[in-house]
Image (cartoon, rainbow, N blue to C red):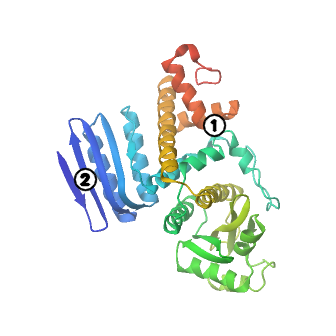
Amino acid sequence: MSVTKGTPDFGAVTNFEGDAATIALRGRVESGSAFELGAILDAAIDRKPASMVLDASELEYVGPAGLLAVSNAEKRLAVLGITLKIQSPSTLVNRLVGMMELAEVSRLERALPGHGHLGPEQLGERGDLTQRFASSLSSEDLRRLTALPADPDVIDGALRLIVELARISIAGADGVSVSLLRHGVLSTVAASDQTIMAMDADQYSTGQGPCVDASIKGHWFHAESLDTETRWPAFTPQARGLGIKAILSSPLRAFEKPVGALNIYSRTAESFEVKDQESAAVFAQQASVILSDARAGVSDTQMAIRFQEALRSRELITLAKGIIMGREDVDDESAFKVLLRSAHAEGLPLRERAGAIVLSVERPDLRTKGGPDD
């Protein structure tokens, strides 16, 4: 049986062959169509299929609301013991999988509270955030999850998604943008609104501001209150005139060289806490990985391999969480924390620790230390 729903910008065809469900998506999933996508996924899950495949080969873009709809469907299916499979050879799915994985990364702060922090503005090339997350999600994991070809439209689309995710995830963020150095000139490639575009443009024209300094100097800048800020006298009055009171700019790097900045703006002074600075650094790291891969060049064959590895990584993590939920009688969030702490304690990437837990069920004689039973 096949069911077709959609609008001029978004469409979905749900097909059932026996108890196997396939949902083929096309177009763009933004705020309005995300609700429709959620309803389509819920309706399919209500039929309790034995398997579900999401075909995204004709999907052009998916925003945070769409990601949330997919994530919620994935959780519902996990309760039924089913892994949602995302099927597509396109670059979009690499972006989609990467952004969904980023949502898992954002939970690290809640799972490991107090384990280091950024503190004052970083003056070195690296903050301690890389060390903080190194044991649970390696840079190679991130590369595999976000491999993109050197296509400016695709790159800008991925960065636009990061802007949207940062805006809704970071407390106090009234606007977000990404600035990039292209041909030696700073320009804004993604911004949440026209006021934020103007903020960036004022910094470019004056040659002053946290966005410019982060892009060129390669460390992050935090203007806690523009009412008392003295570092950028030509830019600060213009920002205040547009109602901006605080700015946090984190550098973007490609092959260890600064190439731009992720800029977060607030209309409230002193609105960014240390946890917000850390979250901004995570999003900036994700954007930097995208830019590094794009500049390195990624072939279709490499992308297909990385895509399959990314899917396998997510499947292992989902299976491991299910095993922990059964053993410990805990919910999905608590199971993830157990898995994360176990990986952190053993100094293993999250994927490897998940694989070991799955293997311990398949081969009890190979059960490793540090699992949920220990």
* Residue that appears at 49% across and 68% down: 153
Q: Is residue 325 above or below residue 282?
A: above
Q: Is residue 325 above or below residue 54?
A: above
Identify the image quadrant of residue 200.
bottom right
Residue 52: percent from the left, percent from the top? Answer: 32, 40
Residue 269: percent from the left, percent from the top? Answer: 69, 71
Q: Nearer the viewer, residue 118 or 256?
A: 256
* Residue that appears at 21% across and 55% down: 4
Question: Position of 145 compared to 185: left or right?
Answer: left
Identify the image quadrant of residue 293.
bottom right
Question: Position of 196 compared to 229: left or right?
Answer: left
Q: Give the mark, 2 or 1, whose residue is nearer the N terminus.
A: 2
Local crowd at mark 1 within 10 Å, few (<14), some, or many (≥20)?
Answer: many
The CA span between labels 2 and 1 is 37 Å
Residue 56: percent from the left, percent from the top? Answer: 37, 53
* Residue that appears at 74% across and 45% down: 131
- Residue 106 visible to the viewer: no
SS class, disc 1 = loop
Which image quarter is the C terminus in? Answer: top right
| Residue annotated with mark 2 | 13
Residue 98, label in figure:
none
Residue 287: percent from the left, percent from the top? Answer: 61, 59
User: In the rendered structure, which amino acid carries the disc numbered 1?
Assistant: Pro
Local crowd at mark 2 within 10 Å, few (<14), some, or many (≥20)?
Answer: some
Q: Is residue 186 above or below residue 333?
A: below
Residue 349, label in figure:
1
**Farthest-out residue, top:** 365
User: In the rendered structure, which amino acid carries the disc numbered 2?
Assistant: Val
Identify the image quadrant of residue 284.
bottom right
